[in-house]
């Protein structure tokens, strides 16, 4: 899942070398914490959060296929 999110995000941002993803867990399941350059934050979130919602939807579908549950947290 980490590779999937990394591929999507590095395709969107201006500074792909600054994309960092950490795996963690919370009470709902596994969480991917996404760190990007401050100038790329708007591109990852998108207008009214549409891009972030789309990335989360893809992540949910891919993780459900593997029988797991992943969430995405965008860290500022």
Image (cartoon, helix red, strand yellow):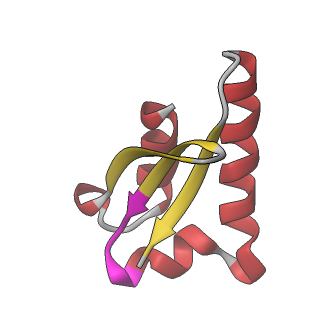
User: What x and y, as percent, mark residue 34?
Assistant: 42, 59
Does residue 58 lie above or below 63 as drawn? below
Residues 63 and 29: in front is 29
User: What x and y, as percent, mark residue 54?
Assistant: 74, 54
Does residue 74 lie above or below 1 as drawn? below
Residues 35 and 24: in front is 24
Find the magenta span and give its range. Answer: 34-39
Whether residue 15 appears in magenta in the rendering, the answer is: no
- Residue furthest out toward the left: 17
- Residue at the image point whose x is 66% and y is 16% from the top: 66
Numbered marks: total: 0
- Residue at the image point whose x is 65% and y is 24% from the top: 68
Residues 21 and 6: in front is 21
Whether residue 38 appears in magenta in the rendering, the answer is: yes
User: What x and y, as percent, mark residue 55?
Assistant: 66, 51
- Residue furthest out toward the front: 27
Does residue 47 lie above or below 71 as drawn? below
Q: Is residue 68 left or right of residue 4?
A: right
- Residue at the image point whose x is 66% and y is 75% from the top: 46
User: What x and y, as percent, mark residue 23?
Assistant: 39, 43
- Residue at the image point whose x is 32% and y is 57% from the top: 19
Q: In this view, does 50 lie to the left or right of 59?
A: right
Q: Quadrant of the C terminus?
A: bottom left
């Amino acid at each position: 899942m980490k590779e999937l999110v990394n591929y999507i995000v590095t395709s969107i941002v201006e500074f792909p070398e600054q994309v960092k993803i950490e795996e963690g867990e919370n009470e709902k399941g596994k969480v991917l914490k996404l760190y990007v350059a401050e100038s790329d934050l708007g591109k990852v979130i998108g207008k009214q959060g549409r891009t972030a919602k789309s990335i989360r939807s893809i992540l949910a579908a891919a993780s459900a296929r593997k029988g797991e549950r992943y969430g995405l947290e965008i860290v500022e």
